[in-house]
Each structure stands twice: as C-alpha cells, then as structure tokens.
Amino acid sequence: METVGQKAILNELFKRLTEPAKSRIKLYQIAILIYMDQILNLVINKFMFFRVKIEEKKSNLSLSKMRQSQIKLDILSKERIQQSLDLVHAKARKSFVDLQKMHENCKSHQETPELFCEPYIHNGFRPINQPYSYYALSLFTKHNETINAWSHYLGAMYTLYLAFTMDFSDHFSWPLLSCLITATIMFISSATAHLMHQKSHLCHMTCFLCDFGGISFNGYGAAFMQTFICSPVWYYKNLEPYLLPIIGLQSALCCLLNSIAQTKYKRPYPPIKRFLQFAPCGLLWLFAILPLFLNFFIDSPGENLKISYALHFCHIFTFLLGAAFFALDFPQRFFPGRLDFFGQGHNIFHVCIFFVVYFQFKACYTDFVNNRDIIKSTRQEPNVYMCFGSLILLVSYYFYMIRSFYNMIKHNFDAEGNLIMTKKTK
Ligand SMILES: [Zn+2]
C-alpha cells in the first residue's frame, strides 16, 4: 500500500512526464522526495508506535484500577459472606439452644431425686408421681427422654415392617424371623422403659430390669441368627447340638447380672455396675460374631461372602461406636447441661443400636440368599420349637427373674413407689 508521500511523488512524476521535456523533474529532486517520504514514514510510524504505547498504558491503568476495584469487591463480598456465615452460625446456635429448652413442666436436676438423674444432664426431667397416662402422653412433648423413646419406637416399627413384609415361608429363614422378633421386643421394652421410668423409684427399677431383659433377649436372637447362617460348615457341625443351650445360658446370665447391677448399686454408680452390664453382653456379642471371624480368617470367604462382609463390618463398627458413646458419657461430659434434649451419648447409643440391628439383619439376609444351598445341606431344618419355643421359654425366664427382683426390692418403697429412705425430693 502506498503512503501519502509516495502518492505525491508518483503524481509529481506523472505530471512532469506529461509536461515538455525541459520542465521535466530532475533525478536528484526525485531522490530528495523519496528520502523525505522515508523520513515522513519513519515519523508517522514512530508517532503511531508511541500512540499505541500510550493507549496500552491507559488501558493497563484502567485494568489495574479494575483489578483494584475487583479486589475491593472481593474483600467486600468476603466480608459479606463472613457476616452471613456469622449470622447463620448465630441463628443455628440460637435454634439449637431453643431446641434444647424443655417443656415448662420439666424440672432441673436439682429438683429431681438422684435416682432419675444422669451425669451431665441438667434439665428436662419430668415430675415424678404423675398418672401413667402423663408419661405415656409425654412421648409427644419435649423432655430429656423423648429422643431415647422415639429412636427405639421407630426401630420397633422398622423391624415389625420387615417381619410382616418379608417372605419367611422357607423354614431355613426362620432364624432371621426370630431375630426380628427379639429385636422388636428389645426396641419396645427399651423405648417404654425410657418413657415410663420417671413415675416412681420402683417404676424406674422395674422399667430398666425390663430394658435389660430386652437387650439380653435380642442378644440371643442375634447370636442364633448369625451362628446359624454365617458359620463355616465344620464349626456349625460341631456346635449344633449345644448352640441353643450355650446362647440361652449366656442371655440368661446377661439378664441376671444386669438385674443385680441395677438393684445392688446406688447412685453415683461405681464402675463395677457398668462392667456387670457390659461384660456378659459383650461376651454374648463376641460369641455371635465369632463365626464371621472364622469365615474370614480360617475359611477364605467366597465372592458372595465378601459382599456381605461390608455389612458385617458396619454392624461391628456401629456396635463399638455406640458402646463407646454410652460408656464414656460422650459428648455431654464436655457440654454439661447443653445436650439435655438432643445429642447426649444415650441418644447416639440408641441410634447406633438401631443401625446395629439393621446391618446385622441385612448382612445375614445377604449371606442366607447367597449360601442357601450350603445352609440347607449342612444344617438341621429349623422347627417351631427351636426358633420360637426357645423365645417363649426365655421370655418366661425373664418375667420370672424380673418378678423375683421386684419382690426382693419392693419393701424398700412406699405405696407410691418412692424410695422410703429418700422420699423427700431435693
Ligand atoms: Zn436406653
């Protein structure tokens, strides 16, 4: 593309060439024109170069300004985000504190007899000596046992739902059904104990004797189901004639030691009380999970077994987790009086027990479906006496034992069921 100078030169050349020869442009004049044109081009280029630089500088300046304003915006938005987070945190905290506030009829631990008080729980105790209907209806009000009652009533609904909707026409699946029955009774006795125990001292003792009976009963059902379904062939063959007496005796021992611990020791409870509660239950639980370890470490599990092992692992982990929350009074020991309604260790323990039952049943059902043929060919076919007669026998034993302990302790209480020595509330 020709520049302005080049155009002028070409025009001049054309003009001169068309003129008479004497007036034609001389060569040196052309050279000067070309030279001037070069200089002009150089000047123009330099000018354009500086212009571009200036523009760039300007745009850089505006860019940095934009960046600065962006940073300011960022800081502002961060401040705003922080403010909103603080607001959300404050609101959540307030809602949590409001949530923990109890029903206006509830008493503090200073106004409640020592027997009903739990460590690190300061509020939400229902008044004692009310009609039974008051405690039954308190299921729908806020107090420090609401979550404990609901968590296990919901558990009972779930196990009942499974018991009524699953197909148990195959006799070999009856150990699964008997475990569901024991789990349902455990959930109902535990939830009812937490709901009703505050009526009186005697009621408290009786309710928790029933609660321990339910725990021992489920220990039996779970041990029977797991040993029957998950044991290696050689182990079950040797154990079969003694299985029900062994787990029946262990379950009876659980109930007995728990009842002794409950009636013998007074608050504040010594550590031996928890040992007497945990040791026999732990022993029964270890016996129930023994077949899983035998399968895993001695008989290498098949592909199908490996699938159910994730569920077995969840059951074992959840059981240990729940036991730790219960035994250590965690987390309420670090927040005394702040987890009275929701979040106390016993709430978490109850939820864990629900998941223990859930994972245990799912794992055994998976094993049963995958190994049905092996189970059928290596086990004696379960009958009504074995699966349900033994449950009736155990329940009768629990009732007899609870009745015996009730008769042993009832003379310590007055007509209203309050402890004679400490009838006056604090
Ligand atoms: Zn409980």
Image: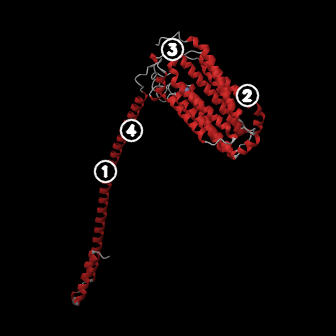
Distance from disc 3 to disc 2, alpha carbons, whole Å, reads 40 Å
In the image, what residue occupies the spot 30% across and 73% down?
38
Q: Name the amino acid, label 1.
A: Lys
In percent of width and height, residue 102 lies at 42, 25
Q: Name the amino acid, label 4.
A: Leu
In percent of width and height, residue 418 lies at 52, 14
Distance from disc 1 to disc 3, alpha carbons, whole Å, reads 82 Å
Residue 416, labelled with which disc? Answer: 3
Q: Name the amino acid, label 3.
A: Glu
Of marks 2 and 1, which one's residue comes earlier in the chain?
A: 1
Q: Say which of marks 3 and 2 sits in front.
A: 3
In percent of width and height, residue 120 lies at 49, 22
Residue 85, labelled with which disc? Answer: 4
Figure check: 327 above or below 312 = above
Left or right, residue 327 beside residue 372:
left
Of marks 3 and 2, which one's residue comes earlier in the chain?
A: 2
Of marks 1 and 4, which one's residue comes earlier in the chain?
A: 1
In the image, what residue occupies the spot 63% across and 41% down?
310
For the question of whether residue 32 can be seen, the reply is no
For the question of whether residue 182 can be seen, the reply is yes
In the rendered image, which quarter contains the N terminus? Answer: bottom left
In percent of width and height, residue 272 lies at 62, 18
Residue indicated by mark 1: 65
Q: Residues within 10 Å of mark 1 (few under 14, many from 20)?
A: few
Left or right, residue 92 beside residue 357:
left
Q: Say which of marks 2 and 1 sits in front.
A: 2
Residue indicated by mark 2: 245
Q: Say which of marks 4 and 2 sits in front.
A: 2
In the image, what residue occupies the spot 25% across and 82% down?
11
Distance from disc 4 to disc 3, alpha carbons, whole Å, reads 53 Å
Figure check: 263 above or below 98 = above
